[in-house]
Amino acid sequence: MARPTLHDAALRERLLEVTAGGVDRYGPARLSLRQIAADAGTSTTAVYSLFGGKAELLAAVLDGAFASFGTSQRAAADGGLLALGVAYREWALAHPALYRLMFGGALAAYADCSPDPEAAGDSMAPLREAVAAGQESGVLRDEPLDIIVLGIWGQVHGLVSLELASVGPTDADWGGLYRSTLDAVLRAWAA
């Protein structure tokens, strides 16, 4: 009797990584489970066994991306808003394919493929908590919490997205520009 194929955590992670890169390169519609399995060095049976199908695999990629992003934000939370902003950019530059999947809309056509709302919300919790703490201490303006969170997120997200898309001067000092933008954003919301 043949031994069953082991579909372990390492294979699961490899499939998630291959899928993220494949969707980033080809788009979700053109990427097949057969291609994903081949690129991961396994069979489509492993994909079905571990995830159930393409939509579930794509959703797992999104959930994993938000979890990873959230972990990096929680690790930086003690440093306040500035540290959260730095961690945001560092994570995005280290995981560009995941960042584009999370925020680029590539999976929007897959109505049955959306991130777990709790995972996505949890990833932004450190920012919300830092803004609330800043308001409580009187450092940040007394505006609706969601408005400040969205304003800060929009600024850092926009600049990181431009950097990842290589939009701007070829000799741009993205790190310096980003730091200056963080400083300006924090001053703009100061009490």
Image (cartoon, rainbow, N blue to C red):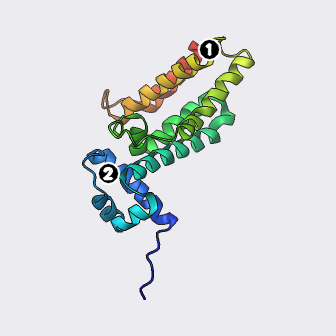
Is disc 1 surrounded by few (<14), some (14 to 19) or many (20+) residues within 10 Å? few
Please state which amino acid type lies under the numbered disc 2: Gly
Residue 22: numbered disc: 2
Q: Is residue 184 left or right of residue 40?
A: right
* Residue 130 position by quadrant: top right
Q: Amino acid at mark 1?
A: Pro
Q: Position of residue 189 (x, y in %)?
A: 59, 14
Q: Is residue 2 above or below residue 32?
A: below
The residue that label 1 is drawn on is: 144
> Where residue 188 is drawn, which disc sits there?
none
Q: Residue extending furthest right? A: 137
Q: Which residue occupies the extreme bottom position in the image?
A: 1
Residue 28 against residue 148 in the figure, above or below = below
Residue 7 in view here: yes
Q: Earlier in the sequence, mark 2 or mark 1?
A: 2
Q: Are the residues flagged by discs 2 and 1 in contact, CB closer than 8 Å?
A: no
Q: Residue at x 56, y 34 (%)?
A: 121
Label 2 secondary element = helix
Q: Quadrant of the C terminus?
A: top right
**Which residue: 32% across, 58% down?**
36
Q: Quadrant of the N terminus?
A: bottom left
- The secondary element bearing badge 1 is classed as loop
Q: Is residue 180 visible?
A: no
Indicate left or right for 19 with 30 as reference: right
Which corner quadrant of the image does residue 166 belong to? top left
Residue plotted at (30% across, 65% down): 38
Q: Please state which of residues 190 and 33 is positioned toward the viewer in this rendering.
A: 33
- Where does residue 175 sit, x and y in percent of width and height? 46, 32
Whether residue 81 sits left or right of residue 48 in the image: it is right
